[in-house]
């Protein structure tokens, strides 16, 4: 019996890998952006209208949360 995956199975597997890779990239981007926001000084925070508490809440979210 031939156990070679079908073309459809390969396409589904490739789609799953792409989806997972996209998620990992989004998580990394979010983590980097939160780190940058946390590093802002008071002047920059005022310019964008965020308080220290707003920054703290955003910077301390888990990377997987939007």
Image: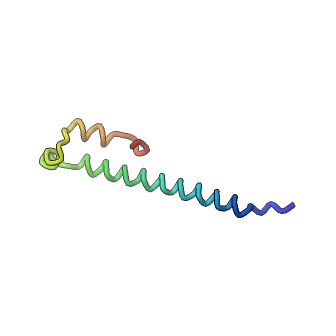
Along the horizontal axis of the image, is 52 left or right of 19? left
Residue plotted at (64% across, 57% down)? 12
Residue plotted at (87% across, 60% down)? 1
Colouring used for the render: rainbow
* Residue, far right: 1
* Residue, far front: 8
Residue plotted at (20% across, 38% down)? 52
Badge count: 0
Residue plotted at (53% across, 54% down)? 19
- Residue 60 in percent (x, y) is at 33, 40
Along the horizontal axis of the image, is 46 left or right of 32? left
Question: Relative to 32, does residue 65 appear above or below in the rendering?
Answer: above
Question: Relative to 34, does residue 21 appear above or below in the rendering?
Answer: below
- Residue 43 in percent (x, y) is at 12, 48
Along the horizontal axis of the image, is 40 left or right of 11? left
- Residue 54 in percent (x, y) is at 24, 38
* Residue, far left: 43
Along the horizontal axis of the image, is 12 left or right of 50? right
> Dividing the image into 4 quarters, which one contains the C terminus?
top left
- Residue 4 in percent (x, y) is at 77, 63
């Amino acid at each position: 019996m031939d156990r070679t995956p079908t073309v459809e199975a390969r396409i589904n597997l490739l789609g799953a890998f792409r989806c997972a890779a996209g998620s990992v990239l989004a998580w990394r981007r979010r983590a980097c952006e939160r780190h940058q926001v946390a590093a802002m000084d008071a002047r920059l925070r005022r310019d964008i209208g965020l308080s220290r508490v707003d920054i703290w809440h955003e910077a301390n979210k888990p990377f997987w949360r939007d």
